[in-house]
C-alpha cells in the first residue's frame, strides 16, 4: 500500500498533533481507546459468565484489530469466508473459525490447503455433500462444527435428525473431527425491544438444544456451542446454551445498533467514523461533503452527524442540511457515524487509527473484498 501517494501522505501524519483533522478523505477512522474499551467490556462479561469470546472479524477484516481482540481475551477469531481466513492467516492470525458453510470442491480445497499450511482452521458444515467434499481433499485434521438452523433459514441443517445424519458422515471421514455445533440467528440481533429479543433467542436456542441432545445421545462431540452476536450477547449469556460467542459489531458499533436497547449495548461506544471534507459551502442551507454512496454501506439508515441531516447526493458526494452560522467552512474535515459498520469498513483499504486528535497508526483492511 505504501507506494500509493495518499497512503504516504497519511503515514507522514502519524504522531502529529491535530493530524486526525488532516487524514485524506473519505476515510475510515477508528478511535483506538473507545474500541479497546468495547473489547474489554465484552471480554469481561463473557469471562464472568464462563463463556468463550471468539469475535467475528467480518466487521473489521483487519489482522491488527484482531490482535487487539486476542490481547483483550478472545480465544480466537471468526471469519465469514475462506478468503477472509486466507487473508488473516497470511497476516498472522492463527486460530480461525469459518462461520459460513464450505460448499463445493474448490472451496474445500482451499480450506484443506490452509489447514495443511498450519492454520488452526475450523469450519461449519450443514450438508453431507459438503462434508464429503472436504473429506476428499483434507490432508490434515480439520475441526468441524455442525451449523444448525435456529430459525433464520439462511444456513444450517433444518432438523436435529439432519444434524445426526451429518454427524455420521463427519465421523466416518478420517480427517474431519466433529467438535460441536453453531446456531446463529442474525435477525434477532436487531430486535429493538429487549424482552422480545430475549424471547426470540430463547426460542431459537431450544432448537439448538434439541440438536445437541440428539447428538449427545448418540455419543457425538458437542463440546463447542457457538453463535450469537452483538445485539443478543446479554441474552445469550443469560440463556446459557452457547459456550462460545461470536459478536462482531460490538468492536465499533454503528447507527443501526442505536435503536437496539439494553444496558450492555448502552455500555458500548461508537468507535468507527467516516471522515469527510466539506468540498462546497456556497449554499446557505447545505454543505457538500466528499462522502457519498461509495463511502458508506447503504443498506441501513443514513450516516449520522450532529451538524444536520445527511442526504445521499451521488456516488461521491453527500449533502448536510445546515445553515448554522458556525457551520464548518470549505475544506474542513468532519466525521460521520456509519449506518452499518461491517460493509462500510469493506469499502476502505486502510483503517486510520486515532487517539484523541492524533493519527497514531494505519491498519490494512487485510481481508477487504475477500468474500470468495
Ligand atoms: N456470526 C455470524 C454467523 C454472523 O453472520 C454475524 C453477522 O452478521 C455475526 C456473528 C456478528 O454479528 P454482529 O456484527 O451483529 O455482532
Ligand atoms: Mn452487520
Image: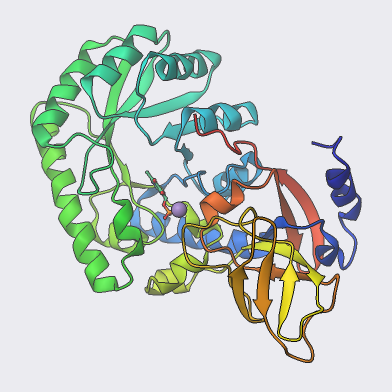
| Percent x, y of residue 352 | 74, 53
Q: Nearer the viewer, residue 255 or 97?
A: 255
Quadrant of res 112 = top left
Q: Is residue 355 above or below residue 128?
A: below
Is residue 251 visible in the rendered image? The answer is yes
**Count of labels shown?**
0
| Percent x, y of residue 336 | 65, 68
Residue located at (60% from left, 60% from top): 35
| Percent x, y of residue 131 | 28, 18
Q: Is residue 175 above or below residue 93?
A: above
Q: Is residue 63 above or below residue 289?
A: above
> In the image, 71: left or right of 333?
left
Quadrant of res 172 = top left
> In the image, 164: left or right of 275?
left
Quadrant of res 8 = top right
Residue located at (31% from left, 66% from top): 191
Q: Nearer the viewer, residue 247 or 118?
A: 247
The colour scheme used to paint the residues is rainbow
Q: Nearer the viewer, residue 158 or 319?
A: 319
If the image is split into quadrants, where does the N terminus sit?
top right
Residue located at (15% from left, 56% from top): 203
Residue located at (30% from left, 56% from top): 187
Is residue 175 visible in the rendered image? The answer is no
| Percent x, y of residue 230 | 41, 58
Amino acid at each position: 500500500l505504501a507506494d500509493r501517494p495518499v497512503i504516504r501522505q497519511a503515514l507522514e501524519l502519524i504522531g502529529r498533533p491535530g493530524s486526525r483533522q488532516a487524514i485524506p478523505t473519505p476515510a475510515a477512522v477508528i478511535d483506538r481507546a473507545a474500541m479497546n474499551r468495547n473489547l474489554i467490556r465484552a471480554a469481561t462479561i463473557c469471562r464472568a459468565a464462563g463463556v468463550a469470546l471468539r469475535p467475528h472479524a467480518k466487521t473489521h477484516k483487519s489482522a491488527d484489530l484482531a490482535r487487539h481482540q486476542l490481547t483483550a481475551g478472545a480465544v480466537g477469531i471468526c471469519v465469514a469466508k475462506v478468503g477472509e481466513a486466507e487473508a488473516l492467516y497470511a497476516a498472522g492470525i492463527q486460530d480461525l473459525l469459518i462461520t459460513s458453510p464450505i460448499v463445493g470442491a474448490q472451496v474445500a480445497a482451499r480450506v484443506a490447503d490452509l489447514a495443511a499450511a498450519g492454520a488452526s482452521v475450523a469450519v461449519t458444515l450443514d450438508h453431507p455433500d459438503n462434508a464429503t467434499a472436504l473429506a476428499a481433499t483434507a490432508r490434515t485434521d480439520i475441526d468441524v462444527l455442525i451449523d444448525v438452523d435456529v430459525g433464520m433459514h439462511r444456513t444450517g441443517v433444518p432438523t436435529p435428525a439432519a444434524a445426526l445424519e451429518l454427524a455420521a458422515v463427519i465421523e466416518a471421514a478420517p480427517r474431519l473431527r466433529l467438535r460441536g455445533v453453531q446456531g446463529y440467528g442474525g435477525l434477532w440481533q436487531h430486535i429493538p425491544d429487549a424482552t422480545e429479543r430475549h424471547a426470540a433467542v430463547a426460542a431459537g436456542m431450544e432448537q439448538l438444544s434439541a440438536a445437541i441432545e440428539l447428538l449427545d445421545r448418540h455419543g457425538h462431540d458437542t463440546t463447542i456451542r457457538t453463535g450469537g452476536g452483538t445485539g443478543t450477547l446479554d441474552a445469550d449469556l443469560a440463556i446459557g446454551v452457547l459456550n462460545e460467542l461470536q459478536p462482531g459489531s460490538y468492536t465499533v458499533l454503528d447507527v443501526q445498533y442505536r435503536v437496539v436497547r439494553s444496558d450492555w449495548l448502552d455500555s458500548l461506544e461508537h468507535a468507527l467514523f467516516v471522515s469527510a471534507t466539506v468540498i462546497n459551502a456556497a449554499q446557505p442551507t447545505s454543505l457538500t461533503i466528499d462522502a457519498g454512496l461509495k463511502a458508506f454501506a447503504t443498506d441501513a439508515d443514513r450516516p449520522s452527524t450532529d451538524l444536520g441531516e445527511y442526504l445521499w447526493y451521488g456516488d461521491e458526494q453527500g449533502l448536510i442540511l445546515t445553515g448554522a452560522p458556525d457551520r464548518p467552512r470549505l475544506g474542513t474535515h468532519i466525521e460521520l457515524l456509519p449506518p452499518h459498520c461491517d460493509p462500510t469498513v469493506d469499502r476502505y483499504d486502510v483503517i486510520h487509527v486515532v487517539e484523541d486528535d492524533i493519527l497514531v497508526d494505519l491498519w490494512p483492511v487485510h481481508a477487504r473484498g475477500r468474500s470468495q
